[in-house]
Amino acid sequence: MSSQQALAWSLIAASVAAEVAGTMALRYADGFTRLMPSVAVCALYGVAIWLMSIAVRQLEVGPTYAVWAGSGTALTALLGIVWFDESAHAARLLGLALIVLGVVIINLGAR
């Protein structure tokens, strides 16, 4: 892996963090009726997409998006369980495991 690709994957990690933070802020935005959480949602989603757009200059779009979407979905679901005390049923945990497995399979096919 080149240093440019390593940097691109670091940007994807930062993009995932921004997207997940934006999604967590959605809960507090209360249907975009509260100003500061609403501004945070829009800003964080904007940063997430911007970082992704920089990263895909060096990475393939399909596998990169799979990692971004899958890890963001899994992390958001886990944070919902921990932060908002959402239920952690076996089916939800199995779904998270399948997301991770799907991302691995997509990336193996890209090689």
Image (cartoon, helix red, strand yellow):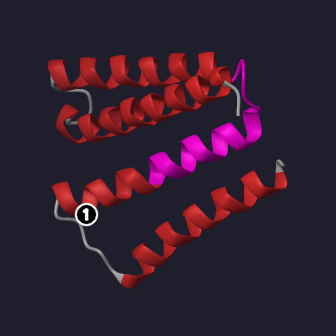
Q: Is residue 4 magenta?
A: no
In the foreground, 58 or 42:
58
* Residue assigned mark 1: 81
Please give left or right for residue 54 compared with residue 111 in the image. Answer: left
Residue lying at the far front in this picture: please name it: 2
Q: Characterize the magenta stretch by its predominant secondary structure.
A: helix
- Residue at position x 56%, y 62% from top? 100
**Above-or-below relation of 14 to 78:** above
Point out the image quarter for the N terminus. Answer: top right
What span is colored magenta in the figure? 56-73
Please give left or right for residue 91 compared with residue 63 in the image. Answer: left
Please give left or right for residue 25 compared with residue 48 in the image. Answer: left
Instruction: Examine the image and state in which quarter residue 27 appears.
Output: top left
Please give left or right for residue 49 compared with residue 54 in the image. Answer: left
- Residue at position x 75%, y 40% from top? 62
Q: Is residue 61 magenta?
A: yes
